Amino acid sequence: MDSMQTTPSRYLARWPWLAYAVALLLTAFVTAVIALIRQAANVGNISMLYLLAVLLTAIAFGSLPAVFASVTSFFAFDYFFITPTHRLTVSNAEEWVALGVLLVTGVITGELAAALRRRAREAERRRREAVVLYDVVRLMQTPDIREALVAVAERLREELGVAAVVVDFGPQAPLTLRAEAGEAEALRIAESSAAPPAHILSQGAAPAGGRTPRGRWVRIVPPRLLAPPRGQDRLNGVSIQLQGRQVGNLILVTEPDSAPLSSADDRLLLAVTNQLGLAVERSRLREVATEAEVLRRTDELKTALLNAVSHDLKTPLASILASAGSLLQGDVTWSDEERRQFARSIEEDAAYLNRLVTSLLDLSRIEAGALRPDREWHDIGALIEDVLGRLRPLTAGHPIAAVISEDVPPVLVDYLHIGDVLFNLIENAAKHTPAETEIRISARRLGGNVQVEVVDQGPGVPAAELQRVFDPFFRAKRRDSPSKGMGLGLAVAKGLVEANGGRIWAENVNGGGARFAFTLPLDAAPGEHRE
């Protein structure tokens, strides 16, 4: 709790006479000290000791109690130490001068000390307000706006020394939110009270200089026929304003029999509510921006999908229809070889469409987070040989080199997923590289991972596109090797590798060619990422 909470002003609000009582006690103490000193020696200007009482009173309580201490010092010195003693009369005119100097000096000293006290307290209030506002702004940067509001409520409760703090944004706010912090009983008072808070801090106009608006507490008096709810007098409310309209309330439940909130607390609460309104508005704008970005990206994906479907689905379908129509022509006699060519064309185009639809389904499951790998222990070398066997017709025009290190242990992966990854990488290498160029597949143990690489000797990937090759529907633009397909293979490969706990990347090889590599963890759990 801030040191401001323990200053005498907290008690003065409840017992305003306390300052004058302390001033009187200090004057009596100094009078006793002067009496003891005068019994031992006759000291000149000993009345100046009363300035200590005046200074202490001014520093602790302000100017009016300090003036009271000066006046009581004047009468105490006159009554106890000026001849004739124990009477409020003066026999020597010089003593009047001494008493007058004492009174004037005491008043001036008290005013100066009180002015310094006011400046010190104002500086402390400014510091306190800046610290709390900084904490509020910092806490409101938390991504979860509800957690941020709970943290702010707890911070205010600690700062103000109240029993509970409730931040409530109703339907009229940009976001409907509620956060609570404090004691259970105090929170029940805030929850169960259907009536408005007993005290409402109304916000005034902003003063010149752009300072924080002032406010004043207005007491809400319930009808005489209705008894106020229990604990209602402990409720204090501050409206949260946004662009001139109320969007919520900051409700404070004070401790039983506690002092009212100070003017410094009022200003702090008004500043905090302004920040809360702005923070919730910023959160709403962030959500709107996020939704707009999601819609924009969704629109881009839909456009890319439509563009791809219009070409990549139409072409094989047209080929299938043409081949099937040719086979059904009764007025044309086809040779057995021609019929086999038609059937082969239908089979290849149907297989292409099947892979295309499978890739689309895999991509949708990946983006929805619904992909669940069925992981078992498999030999990575046997998996590579299996994929190469399936791709033999496509890779017939390329020398294939498969290098599997002897220290590669079995890997806990989904066989079909990693098989599809290798299939896509090797298929891309075969399609986008010149004939008779080597395709090299290797697997080796690297730390706690197994790293698999597919290296070709083609033109490589343009440097500006290396970071985008794994994006859905992205197809590199190369004049010497036009891109084919919908740009789904690498996007699906990335999702499948990450679902099995690994990572995948692409890079160009010095001297020409591209390297696509991915790692698989040897000891990580499903879905974990390991560098």
Image (tube, rainbow, N blue to C red):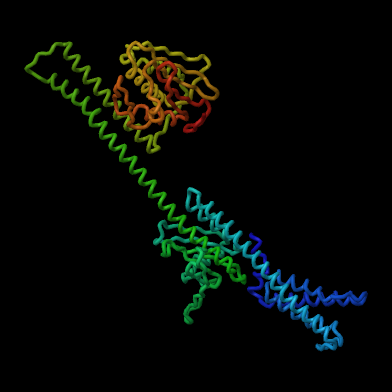
User: Which image quadrant for residue 474?
Assistant: top left
| Residue most extreme to the left | 331
Give the residue at x 50% y 52%. Answer: 140
- Image quadrant where residue 433 sits: top left
* Residue 347 rendering spot, x and y as whole percentages: 24, 20
Q: Is residue 424 above or below residue 272?
A: above
x, y percent for residue 271 = 52, 62
Taking 500 as reference, is 258 above or below it?
below
Q: Nearer the viewer, residue 448 or 36?
A: 36
Is residue 55 found left or right of 436 in the rendered image?
Answer: right
The image quadrant where one finds the N terminus is bottom right
**Direction from residue 45 to residue 451 in the image, left or right:** left
Q: Position of residue 375 (x, y in %)?
A: 45, 28
On screen, residue 198 above or below 519: below
Looking at this view, is 3 or 223 the one in front? 3
**Residue at left 32%, top 33%?**
361
Residue at horizontal 80 percent and vertical 77 percent from the top: 28
- Residue 33 image-quadrant placement: bottom right
Q: Is residue 102 above or below residue 59?
A: below
Mark count: 0
